[in-house]
Amino acid sequence: MKKWSILLGVLVFAGLVVYVFRYAKDAFSHMEHYVTVETDSEIPKTKDEGDVIVLSTEGYDTENPTYYTYRSELYVDLDTVNAAYAGERFYYDEEANRIIYTTSTRVMNCEIGPAYDLKNGRGASGLPTFLFVEDKPEEESSEEESSEFIAGEESSESQEDSSGESMEESEEESVEESLEETAIEPELPENTEPVTGNVYMRAAAVTDLYGVEFLYDKASNVLVLEDATRRYVDVQDTGETQYLKVHPQEGNPFGQMFGFSKGYEVYRELTAGETLIVFGEEEDYYKIADRDGKIGYVKKEAVSGVRYEQAETIQLDTYELPASKKMDLPISVIWQYFSADYGGYLGGDAMEHYTEVVTSDTLKVVAPLFLHIMEDDDGNAYLYDASSQDYIDWMHENGYKVWVTLENVDNYYDDLNEKLTELMKDTERRQTMVQQILEFYKIYGFDGINIDLEGLPEEIGPYFVQFMRELSATVRPEGCVVSVDLNVPTGWNGYYRYDVMGDVCDYICLMAYDEHYANDTTAGSVASYPWVQAGVQDALTEGIPSEKLVLCMPLYTRVWSLTASGMVMPEYTRTISMEEAWDLVNNDWYEEVEWDRTTGQYYAEIIYGDNSKSRVWLEDARSMQLRIDLAKAKELGGVALWYYGWDTTEIWDLIADYEHGE
């Protein structure tokens, strides 16, 4: 009897199951089974005020220091703006707590706090363009607010309300109509103590300058980050309601009766034509994010095929010299060396040299060292002008272009580069020097400025780069050619930023010499051909356009003195002209020379009675022709010679053939 009771119960249960699936299924299918889930339960909370919830393919991140919110507006870390969009055109002066924005034609000094129209170089109304957010001490409570430093902001209510509305009219009238380009801003009060933190730039300003769209939803405080290759789908009109689902699975109406409703949990209904960002896929579903920062799942059959889009490449503004200021390539340059205390720039020998030995048909540019970094009585570096108007006028009359050179090597100050670092670090002094150079250009009427600041310490790197940016943006629009002299790239001089120099300068003069320098403890060539060849390729690899690269060639060599054991005696090393070197070998040593295939130069040595010796690698037309051929093969902008007085007639014959395409 008991067995029959159990069997009867099983049959009744089975009958109920059949009934439900056969007769009740249709009824369930017409019922509303979808359950709306609030996204607040899924989107995480930020720890501190000002933090942004960043959504990427990795999920949500609530502690991303790259982004910040101030009064419901998104701000982006300035280092990120520089690296990702601006090509490092924003320079932060920590001492003055000021931002310098440098384009190809304008220098704009910006304070922390005010609003700016960066595109048009003037003041504006609204929220601050730049914020400085102090780092929070580790022991500080996470519930306390972040500290924003906004210079000049009297109250948050007077600038802009939280909805993003503009300033009151009375405050708009106080905003300057425009900022004077390259002007020196008044000094800010000194900080009582140093603070650490990050500078942020308003995302709307980044969008205005570079067209970058930030998918930031103010309501949810979520920023959606997309990959460089972006994937989109569009919601299709299928005749049925489509949902942004919480889970990638179908719902079962019968299972929902017993509490299994994951397949029916949704965030919201989707609208036909709505674009969604694809982050991944799981079987029949795409994992997507909408533009409000909600992440969920959508059926593949409910959307279009995946559309791939590549992030647009940002094209930064550039400046090209007018055709009247450009020279036909290739060019040729020679430096003329003058001491800052030297009085006679244009003697009879020089006039004869530039009219008979060489002419403007062969040589395009002369580069006299007229501007010098010196120290004043107080030990401060300053710009000393030793220019000669007569020299410049005479060169122009005889068809030459004049690039006045600014140098830092002709001095007797042991700490000059330290003082120069202080000058370049100080924005006001640095920009004053730029304005001085512009004034000299207008007074003397030379054609270009050549910057020859050598042996700079690594700490000056960012200040030197900013100096070159500001110099370029200031003088090039006035028609002044800008060139800079750089050593061949090595592991120690990357802070000169060859890539930036290639952008802001018209020519980069590659000083392909001093492979073995004056105080070197190893005897060797000043500029062996393989070393020069590698240096040229490295400079091109660093990002310098070939048409801007000028190969500098030495008109000198070094005579090395060695002990009997082969040790170099630097105190006896001599730097002499190529002509003097040949006279020494032929008339004093009476030694035979041999061609050294490894260096691409002639080599000679003499052994003395005590077994000490002297060695020299010689420059001549053959070694110079190898470098000129290299300049041709690499389609470089030209060649240059260091320096006037050490040149020979046979060298000018080579340059003439090069200039005339022979």
Image (cartoon, rainbow, N blue to C red):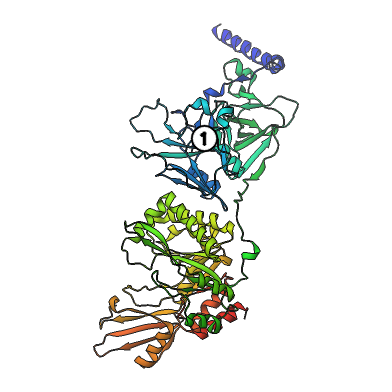
* Residue nearest the viewer, comparing 326 with 555: 326
* Residue nearest the viewer, comparing 179 with 248: 179
The residue under the point 39% across, 44% down is 95
Query: Circle 1: is it few (<14), some (14-19), or many (20+) Cα within 10 Å?
Result: many
Give the total number of marks visible in the rendering.
1
Element under disc 1: loop
Q: Is residue 23 left or right of residue 515?
A: right
| Image location (x, y in percent) of residue 292 | 60, 30
* Quarter of the rendering occupied by the C terminus: bottom right
- Does 101 sit above or below residue 420? above
* Quarter of the rendering occupied by the N terminus: top right
Q: Is residue 385 left or right of residue 355?
A: left
| Image location (x, y in percent) of residue 4 | 58, 8
Can you see residue 135? yes
Q: Which residue is mark 1?
A: 128
| Image location (x, y in percent) of residue 381 | 37, 58
Residue at the limit of the structure toward the top, as seen here: 1
Amino acid marked by disc 1: Pro
- Does 581 sit above or below residue 19? below
Q: Is residue 187 left or right of residue 546?
A: left
Can you see residue 117? no
The residue under the point 61% across, 71% down is 329
